[in-house]
Amino acid sequence: MSKFDPYEHLKIIKNQDGTLTRLMKIPQLPATGDVDLLPGQTVVSKDITLDATKNTWVRIFRPVKIPSNDNKIARLPLVIYFHAGGWINFQVSDRVNHETMNKLAFEVPVIAVAVNYRLAPETRLPGQYDDAMDALNWVKKQATDPNGEPWITEYVDFSRVFLYGTSCGANIVLHTALRVINQDISPLTIAGIILCEPFIGGKKRTRSELKMAADLLFPLPVIDLLWELALPNGTDRDHRFCNPLADQQVKKKMEKLGRCLVIGFGGDPLIDRQQELVQMMVMQGVVVEARFDDVGFHGIEIVDPKRADAILSFVKEFIL
């Protein structure tokens, strides 16, 4: 039996300079722009540079039809979204991410800002958290600038800002929400955070990790490698970026988190950690809504449209 190779599983090659060659070819979709709508188009999108020196950018999604009350345009909640990809892969222009944001913007409805943060190992943590703060500060700047991005200034209810992330994106959301506690982001108010299948870890194995060590999609050697590629050099999986449950300062700060939605699946090796995270939050007095399903696995929403729709309905209910 050949030895399992996590690099091969992830379709990546590690180069001598520490960068990765990514072999997975993922279909991309361009932003629509806000002119020349196609028949039946429900959402428009545009790309805006966040920080040219870091090559970070955001894609904004806006429903074509904005609800109105008394002939006044209703202001919509804003969702700032961070995609999955194990720290090393994907971007917001990938078909699956673009279409997920289209559905979210149309069906809730919301204005969505999907953040194209830097990837590891070329940028290690906390670079991704810095990119998240850049995105939040960019939205804050639009909110206070009369010449700001019109899709933000004209349509967003700044008292209803939600941070939403999937897998490593959920990790980014958790750590960004903890950072924001000590910062003045007015006029923005974080009305809630959404953690879908949060990617957290630790050196000591949990029961679910051991039980699903050879999981077809997300086996332990792959999980370990992703952390090795993402964490700051010289740290291990008990660093707070990976294991927030082991850090007393993080635990203390958690009591200041607002509302939180956590979504997870029983076939995810990380399920025990996710449930432990919920327990810790509850103990700290956080208002947590936990949606755990015994059936399903890490990233199921990518291949199962019914699960993707179920996640969207949880998110919609939480936002509204």
Image (cartoon, rainbow, N blue to C red):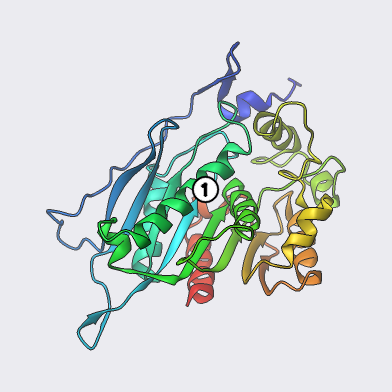
Q: Is residue 79 above or below residue 217?
A: below
Q: Amino acid at mark 1?
A: Ala
Asked whether 223 or 122 is in front, the reply is 122
Q: Quadrant of residue 101?
A: bottom left
The residue that mark 1 highlights is 132
- Residue at image coords 64%, 50%: 171
Q: Quadrant of the N terminus?
A: top right
Q: How many marks?
A: 1
Question: x, y percentage for residue 169?
Answer: 57, 49
Q: Position of residue 303 (x, y in %)?
A: 50, 50
Q: Secondary structure at mark 1?
A: helix
For residue 153, side relative to residue 284 (left or right): left
Question: Which residue occupies 79% across, 54% down?
Answer: 249
Q: Is residue 132 above or below residue 126?
A: below
Q: Of 185 and 66, which appears nearest the observer?
A: 185
104 vs 217, left or right, is left
- Residue drawn where x is 56% and y is 68% of the image: 192
**Residue 19 in the image: x percent, y percent?**
56, 20
Q: Is residue 1 left or right of residue 106?
A: right
Asked if one can make out residue 105 in the rendered structure from this viewpoint, the answer is yes
Return the residue nearer the eye: 120 or 270: 120
Could you classify mark 1 by the number of other residues whose Cα lies within 10 Å: few (under 14), some (14-19), or many (20 or more)?
Answer: many
On the image, the x and y values in percent for residue 95 come to: 38, 45
Between 107 and 177, which is closer to the camera in this rendering?
A: 177
What residue lies at 56% left-to-right and 24% top-to-bottom?
12
Q: Is residue 256 above or below residue 269?
A: below
Task: Please determine whether, in this image, residue 249 is positioned above or below residue 65.
Answer: above
Which residue is at the far top? Answer: 16
